[in-house]
């Protein structure tokens, strides 16, 4: 299959008071339609910078991003972003938050009745149809993230960009959200780039895991294809030899090949291999 999104040889240099800072160096990645890509790497390596360049929120210093043959240089609804913190408008209901995005994209293309059906369809896809007339302060963190995902999906983006979408959720809610996302993915075959710090989440959800080296001048260190059959079921996978091999490969990359020395109160500490599966 041909490339949908071409992240072509990106360098990102930020101007800082101390002079130019090279955050990314020669980041090159081609993504096919329907692929689920995870970006993983230690804190500060440049994952959000990559995502922001694809979103059109940042302009690369060298190289660029091509989506469907067109260069990306500003934000657009064909690249919807889901952030860690839902970013819903607090005075609007779940329905109205999704409506705002749908209006932006489909105003002259759908009738009022079609728009209503479409909004409701997307809210039901994320299992939020029962609470669609509630405001963000009346629903849980997980529910807010569901609305954020519905809002992004309702724009029918060509690429869904997710920056640690479940990072602020408790483990159980997070597992539910991962299952929902796999279910949606199976139905819609979205093209997704997701930043995560969670090794299990990366293996469970991805077709490929893109592992980034530490900055400055961070780049793609290794790409791990995940060929586990779908649908994937977390309990069965816990015992699966291939799942565990992939999980170990990511951990080895992060904690051996890209071992990171942290400075806590003037004391150097190395984040050890078996400490956790959440990347520091
Ligand atoms: N606007 C900016 N100006 C200067 N430096 C920046 C800017 N944005 C990011 N950086 C630097 O670029 C590097 C990469 O940052 P980025 O936020 O992309 O990392 P990250 O991998 O997403 O981190 P985290 O996992 O902690 O969210 C960091 O060293 C950061 O301090």
Image: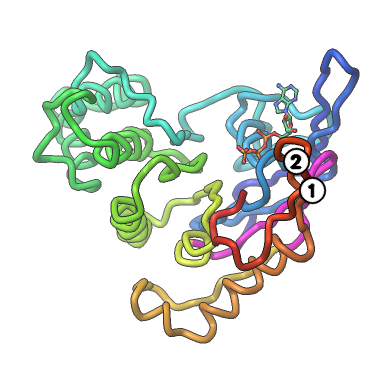
* Residue 67 visible in the picture: yes
Q: Is residue 48 above or below residue 280?
A: above
The question of residue 221 being in magenta is answered with yes
Q: Which residue is mark 2?
A: 263
Q: What is the x, y in percent for residue 233?
A: 34, 73
Front residue of this view, candidates 160 and 158: 160
State yes or no: discs 1 and 2 in contact (Cβ < 8 Å).
Answer: no
Q: Is residue 269 above or below residue 96?
A: below
The stretch in magenta equals: 206-222
Residue at 59%, 56% (x, y): give it. 32
Earlier in the chain: of badge 1 and badge 2, it is 1
Q: What is the x, y in percent for residue 38?
A: 57, 54
CA gap between label 1 and label 2 equals: 23 Å
Q: Is residue 77 left or right of residue 96?
A: right
Q: How is the image coloured?
A: rainbow
Per the rendering, the mark at residue 188 is none
Q: Is residue 235 above or below residue 142?
A: below
Q: Which residue is mark 1?
A: 219
Front residue of this view, candidates 237 and 8: 237
Which residue is outermost to the left? Answer: 130
Q: Is residue 15 left or right of residue 34?
A: right
* Residue 108 visible in the picture: no
Q: Is residue 147 left or right of residue 276?
A: left
Residue 216 figure quarter:
top right
Q: Regarding mark 1 in the picture, which secondary structure is present there?
A: loop
Q: What is the x, y in percent for residue 141?
A: 29, 36
The question of residue 204 being in magenta is answered with no
Front residue of this view, candidates 272 and 41: 272
Q: Regarding mark 2 in the picture, which secondary structure is present there?
A: strand
- Quadrant that contains the N terminus: bottom right
């Amino acid at each position: 299959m041909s490339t949908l999104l071409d992240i072509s040889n990106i360098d990102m240099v930020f101007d800082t008071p101390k002079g130019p800072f090279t955050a990314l160096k020669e980041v090159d990645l081609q993504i096919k339609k329907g692929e689920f890509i995870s970006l993983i790497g230690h804190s500060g390596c440049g994952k959000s910078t990559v995502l922001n360049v694809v979103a059109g929120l940042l302009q690369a210093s060298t190289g660029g991003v091509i989506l469907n043959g067109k260069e990306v240089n500003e934000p657009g609804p064909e690249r919807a972003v889901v952030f860690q913190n839902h970013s819903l408008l607090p005075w609007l209901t779940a329905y109205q938050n999704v409506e705002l995005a749908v209006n932006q994209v489909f105003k002259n293309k759908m009738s009022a009745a079609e728009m209503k059906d479409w909004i409701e369809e997307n809210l039901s896809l994320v299992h939020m149809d029962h609470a669609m007339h509630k405001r963000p302060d009346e629903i849980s963190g997980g529910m807010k993230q569901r609305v954020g995902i519905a809002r992004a999906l309702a724009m029918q983006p060509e690429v869904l960009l997710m920056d640690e979408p479940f990072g602020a959720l408790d483990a159980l809610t997070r597992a539910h959200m991962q299952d929902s996302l796999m279910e949606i993915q199976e139905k819609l075959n979205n093209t997704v780039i997701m930043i995560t710090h969670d090794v299990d989440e990366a293996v469970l959800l991805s077709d490929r895991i893109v592992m980034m080296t530490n900055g400055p001048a961070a780049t793609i260190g290794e790409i791990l294809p995940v060929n586990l059959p779908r649908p994937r079921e977390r309990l069965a996978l816990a015992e699966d030899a291939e799942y565990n091999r992939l999980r170990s490969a990511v951990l080895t990359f992060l904690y051996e090949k890209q071992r990171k020395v942290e400075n806590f109160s003037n004391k150097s500490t190395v984040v050890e291999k078996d400490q956790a599966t959440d990347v520091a």
